[in-house]
Amino acid sequence: MGRSAVGHSSRKIPRKEQKPPTNKSDSPIPRNHFFSPPEVEILRKDLLAWYDGHKRDLPWRRLASEEMDPDRRAYSVWVSEVMLQQTQVSTVIDYYKNWMKTWRTVQDLAGASLEEVNEKWSGLGYYSRGRRLQEGARKVVLELGGKIPRTAEDLQRLLPGVGRYTAGAIASISYGQVTGVVDGNVTRVLCRLRCVGADFTTPAVSDALWSLANGLVDPMRPGDFNQAMMELGATVCTPKKPVCSECPLQSQCRAYRKVEQDPASAVSKLVKKRADSQPAIPPDIEECGPSCPLCIPSCDSWDRALGVANFPRKSAKKAPRVERTLTCVVERRGGPGEAEYFLLQRPQTGLLAGMWEFPSMLLEKDCTEKERREILCSRLQELISPEISGKELRSVGEVVHIFSHINQTYLVYFLSVDLSIKEEESEQPVGRWVTRKQFLNSAVPTAMKKILQLCESKELVTGAPESTKKRKREDKPPPTKKVKAEPDGQRSIQSFFKPAASRK
């Protein structure tokens, strides 16, 4: 999932003493998947020692470690955790810095408009995250007296968009609550440590993983421990190329032991074995029996080439919905200033809520080129002016953009209109004209930026930057220089040399 943990250093945070939950109290986990008490103590010690020496220097960690006010620390953790949902760390860093520079406190965010939030979130994807983050900030200020809830249970219950994982991360990192967390990275680490091979998206496996996480969390450093688990999954126990030789928990990893004991495994020949003696491993997980809800189903085969990457497993992902959308970049020219482009705001609910886009229409069925032009022209006449003619529409090409559940293809057209065209006054959704600079600074989806770049690459828009035009000219091959041939068709040797420049 691309997640990285967030938080402070090993500085202790005052908290209520709380007994960490045990495996048995949370979920009926088969005996062979438990961590024994000695294993738990060794795991905590080894993992935290590794984290203290290997954790990455990230802006949200620095901010949380320096912030003494618990509510401001919780806000900084909250923002980072929401941004990191299904988004890579490298992408989030600049967005996080910009966000915290603009809205340093939950009160600052509560006072912002949705338009401002969407602008800061533009390009980060999954835009509902930003909207819910702001909704949560307003609820904290207007209904909770400016105080962020301090327990995972209250965080999840009271704040919109805060699920079980985010609530646990905020509560453990900011307030020291002894509670575990389970995200994609932690899921991967736990499944490999205990050879959990059943579909981890099922309720039974999910409950078991949460039970394991709650039983492992260190009561003295719960926030650091949770971050260490996530950091291990993000940097060492990775999805496709885990670095088992650098894992501090190698001695307790049953997936690693299974690979090591398989002489036919290609991975076992490449894994670097530790020189120190390995502690005794509990009975192999295969001894659980065919009815174990956590083991690899008997109908699934073990892929020796994958090794430890056989874990975790999940059901096949549902194929994304395929959609085709007509989109038109309408440029208004002829004024004293820059060329402008017409944008419409999307509805306040649903996909890309509140974002701005070029006039677009979802195609419900296959259409001919003539039908597309007629549909698009009719829509533009409603939005802008009845004087618009379909004959002036220029087909530009296609832009493909993949959403989490939609494979979207935009059929892009371009239209240039004069200021002399009288705009239609109607009850259609409010639109606005923006310059290229205003467009780039507006809350526009990434797909719309791709569409404008396509039009610029075709040298259609007036406001295209010179760098784009220069790049297109440079892409053209230089003209072939003709060389006069000698009478017999062969070039003389002199033709390969230029005469020396005369010297003064």
Image: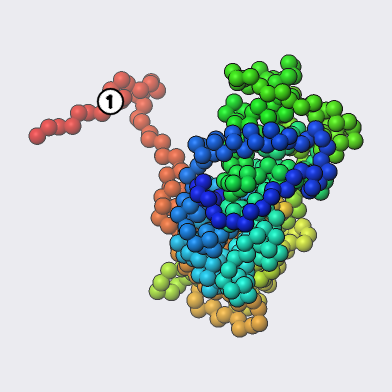
Q: Is residue 491 visible?
A: yes
Q: Locate the C terminus by quadrant.
A: top left
Q: Left or right: where does residue 365 sit relative to residue 19?
A: right
The reply to whether residue 372 is in sight is no
Q: Position of residue 109 (x, y in %)?
A: 53, 68
x, y percentage for residue 325? 69, 60
| Viewer-side residue, 391 vs 440 | 440
Q: Residue furthest front?
A: 17
* Residue 217, x across and y down, in percent: 65, 44
Image point 51% across, 46% down: which residue?
10
Q: Position of residue 413 (x, y in %)?
A: 61, 61
Choose between 64 and 463: the one closer to the eye: 64
Q: How many marks?
A: 1
- Crowding near the residue tagged with mark 1, few <14, some 14–19, many ≥20 C-alpha atoms within 10 Å: few
Write the residue at 73% across / 16% down: 263
Front in this rendered view, residue 97 or 149? 149
Residue 494 drawn above or below residue 397 = above
Residue lying farthest to the right in this orientation: 291
Report which quarter residue 432 is drawn in: bottom right
Residue drawn 60% across and 19% down? 276
Q: Vertically, is 413 above or below 185?
A: below
Tell me the residue at 66%/82% (across/down): 427
Q: Is residue 119 left or right of residue 143?
A: left
Q: Which residue is mark 1?
A: 497
Quarter of the rendering containing residue 189: top right
Which color scheme did the rendering employ for the protein?
rainbow
Amino acid under label 1?
A: Phe
Q: Secondary structure at mark 1?
A: loop
Q: Residue furthest left?
A: 504
Q: Residue 43 lies in what quarter of the image? A: top right
